[in-house]
Image (cartoon, rainbow, N blue to C red):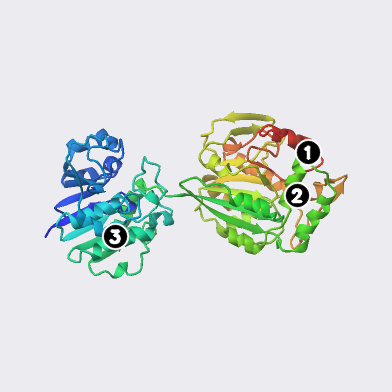
Amino acid sequence: MKVVNLMGRGPSLIRFSQLPKSNHVVLANDFAKEISQVDGFASYLEKQEIHLVFNMVNGGDNQYHHIDFFNKFNIVKLIRPYLNGLRVPGSSTQSIPLEEHFLGENHMKFMYTDLKYQYDYCGTGLAAFAYSMLDCSADVVNVVGLDFYKNLDYGISNYLVNGSEGRDWKKDGGFTVERMQDNFCRLVKGNPHIQVNLVTACKEFIDGMEDIENLNISVLDLDNTSNDEPELLREKQQLNKHIQRKKKLAVVLGGWHYPYEYYNQVRNQKIPDGWECDYFVVSHRDPELPNVLEEKQVLLKGRNDGILQSFDRQLYNRIITKQELKDMGFTYDEEQSSIGDLYQLNQWVQRHYKGQYDKVLFSHDDNYMLNDELFLDILENRVDLFLNSEVNKVTPIEKSFDWKHLSSGVLENTIVPRTSFTFLDKELLDKLAPDFEEVSTKGVDLDRSGETTTIYNLNDEQVDRSPLSSWNWPSRNFKNWMSDNGYTEKSVRMSPLYRVNKYLIEGERGFVWTKEDEERILHNLSQYYDLT
C-alpha cells in the first residue's frame, strides 16, 4: 500500500507529527519559515523523500536557499503547478537544482477554465493535492495544512507561521471557500480507489462533502478551552507559539445625541489587516424620541454659517434609528442613564468585557471624523504621539511607544485626559475593571436617571457647561487611578492641541461649534488642514 502525506502551510499543519508513515511527502510551495520555526518539523522532513510542488514566482526560491533546503533535505522531484505547455520551463529565473515537471493532460478534467490560466486549479495547494491523487499511484493520501481559508472566519491567519508575502489575512487568487472545496471534492470523487484523510481547521463544508465514502475529515478545533485533555492542550500551546490570531478592537459609543453622520463615519473607518472590530452603543435614551433631533434643530437655526457650523448641520441632518444601528453592525444596549461619560464605558465593561479585546475605544457620539485613517494609523503605530504627564508640558514621543491609554488631545493647566474619545489597552483595562465602578462614580452628585432631554442653558449662544460639571469627576478619578497604578507615563495624546487632531474634532455638549471656542478650534484645525 502506497501512502502519500500532503502538507499545506495552513494552521492545521500543526498536526504533521501525527501523520502515519508515508512513502513520500508532498510540500505545497515555500516551507522555509516552518522548517526554521516549528518545533520538530525540520527533523520530520529530514527523514522523508520530498516532492516539491512549487510556483514559478521570480525569487520565490530565495528563502529555501537561505536555509540550504536543497542540500539538507532529500528533494527528489520538482513539480510546477501548471498544465504542461502553459508555462515555459526555466522561465522563472529560480535556481533550483532539479528538473522541472509539469502537470499532464490527466489533470484537465479536474481543472477550471475560467481562472488565471486556460486550465487551472484553485491555487498551488489544490494543485499539490491533485498531483498527490493523480500522479503518485497512491492508495492513501493524508492531508494537513489545507484549511480552505475558513480560518479567516475564526480570526486565525492563513499560515501556521506568518508569511512574508503579505497574504496572512487575504484569500489568495480570489478563490472562494466553496470553490476550493468543490475542487477538492471533484478530485476525491474522481478517484474512489484512493482513501483521503483530511485534517483541517475548517469547520463548515459544502453539501455532500462530509458524505463522500473515500474521504475522512478530522476537524482540528483551534479554540482554547479549559476542558482539553493534556495532550491536546500541549498541541494548542505549541500551535499558539506560531499562529497569528487576529487582534480585536472594541468601539464603544456613548449613545445620547445619535447623529447619523458620526455613526456612519465611525463605521467606515478602515480596519488594518490582522485586526477585527466589534461595535457597541451604550444607550442612555432612545434615539427615536422626537426631542433628540428637535433640541438640536432649535439651536442650529439661529447660528451663522461657518466651517464648524457646517459640520454640526451635517451631523444633525438626521438622527440614526435603532434599526440602522443594527444594520451597521452595532450591538445596542439600553442602560440606566444616571451618569454619562466614563460611566457608560463602565456599563459596557460590566456587560461585555471578558478580556477578549486588545484595544477598546470609548467615544461620545457628538464628535466629527475628518478622515477614515484613524484605526489604521493607531493600530499600525503611524499616529503622532505626545506625552502630557506634567501640567502644560507636551512632549512628542516615538510612534512605536507602547502606550496603555491614548486620548484625543490635551487640556490646559491639568494632566487630566479628555475622555470623550479615548483608547484603553487590554493590560490597563484588565486592571481597571474591578475598580471601574468607583472610578466612574466617585464625587458625582448629579444623577439623571430617566431624563431624556439635554440641559441647554444658553448665554449669548454659548451652552452653559456648569450643569454637568459634576460629571468631570470620573476623568479626574481615572487620572488618579493611573497615577496610583503606574500608568501616568503610559498615558499619551494624539495631539498637543485642545479638541482637535488630524482625525477628528471632539464635540462639546453635542456640537462641534461653540461660541466660546470657535476661534481656538479653527486655529487648531488649521494646524492640520488648509482652511482657506
Residue found 17% across the figure and 39% down from its top: 98
Which of 135 and 493 lies nearest the eye of the viewer?
A: 135
211 horizontally vs 24: left or right: right
- Judged by depth in the image, the label closer to the viewer, 1 or 3, is 3
**Distance between the Cα atoms at labels 1 and 2?**
15 Å
Helix or strand or loop: what does disc 3 sit on? Answer: helix
Which of 211 and 87 lies nearest the eye of the viewer?
A: 87
- Mark 1 or mark 3, which has the lower sequence index? 3
Q: Where is residue 317 shown, x and y percent of the image?
A: 73, 54
Asked if disc 1 and disc 2 are in contact, CB closer than 8 Å, the reply is: no
Query: What amino acid is at disc 1?
Result: Glu
Which residue carries the number 1 mark? 518
Residue found 67% across the figure and 52% down from its top: 261
Assess disc 1: are there few (<14), some (14-19) or many (≥20) residues with their C-alpha within 10 Å of its C-alpha.
some
Which residue carries the number 2 mark? 313
**Distance between the Cα atoms at labels 1 and 3?**
64 Å
Which residue carries the number 3 mark? 184
Residue found 76% across the figure and 35% down from its top: 520
Q: Where is residue 521 shown, x and y percent of the image?
A: 74, 37
Q: Which image quadrant is residue 70 in?
A: top left
Q: Where is residue 253 shown, x and y percent of the image?
A: 63, 53
